[in-house]
Amino acid sequence: MGMKALLRRLFTAGLRLNAALTRSPSGRWLEERLLTPFFVRLTRAIRGPARRPIEDTAEGLGREWERLLGDPRYARVTEIDPATETAYGEITGRCPLRGTGDVAACHRLMAYDRGLLAPYDAQFVVLTSQAEPGRTACRVAIRPQRLDASDAGDTVRRGA
């Protein structure tokens, strides 16, 4: 088994474990305080630092999120809206929460993505979730923290 295949299997196993823990009130503490921060640090160590400084723009933040996740078949930026300084992305990799209806668990699980972007003061907002019945992709918005995000909708939970 090659290194890429091993890393993909480890990522999938970690995602499944975190998804199960975030759905359990007793498992959330472990997931939030230990595992998610560990996986964020591990991802940053594996991917290494960016080759250039990350610009505080939608494009800069969106491309860094893509780079850190490492597989455009799993997650990718689909649009950059210069008018709102927002990068829109989609996560099409199969999520263990797909179709469960547990959108709150999805938002907790996305703490991983928020953690990846935290050093850049980026906002990461889940617009739609694979946890919603019938959805096969999550749609996310990324924008600099310095900008207002109230237009993302009042049903979206940030950092929950």
Image: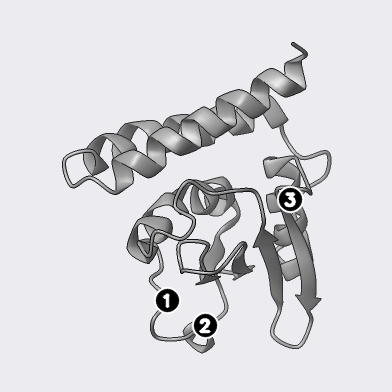
Mark 2: which secondary structure? helix
Which residue lies at the image location 25% right of the left edge and 43% below the top edge? Answer: 28
The front one of 84 and 12 is: 12
Separation of disc 2 and disc 1 at Cα? 7 Å
Residue 156 is marked as: 1
Mark 3 or 2 closer to N-term? 3
Asked whether the residues under the numbered discs 3 and 2 touch, taking CB atoms below 8 Å apart as contact, a structural biologist would say: no
* SS of the residue under disc 1: loop
Question: In the displayed structure, would residue 125 be above or below residue 152?
Answer: above
Compared to residue 85, the image places residue 137 above or below, namely above
Q: Residue at x 76, y 40 (%)?
A: 50
| Closest to the observer, 56 or 2 | 2
What residue is at 72 percent from the left and 22 percent from the top? 5
Q: Position of residue 113 (x, y in %)?
A: 54, 51
Q: Is residue 52 left or right of residue 15?
A: right
In the drawing, does residue 123 fall left or right of residue 74? left
Secondary structure beneath dot 3 equals: helix
Image vertical order of residue 42 relative to residue 20, above or below: above
Q: Where on the picture, by quarter, is residue 24?
A: top left
* Residue shown at 32% from the left, 38% from the top: 31
Q: CA distance from mark 3 to mark 2?
A: 21 Å
Q: Residues within 10 Å of mark 2 (few under 14, many from 20)?
A: some
Q: Is residue 55 visible?
A: no
What residue type is disc 3 on? Glu
- Residue position marked by numbered label 2 in the rendering: 152
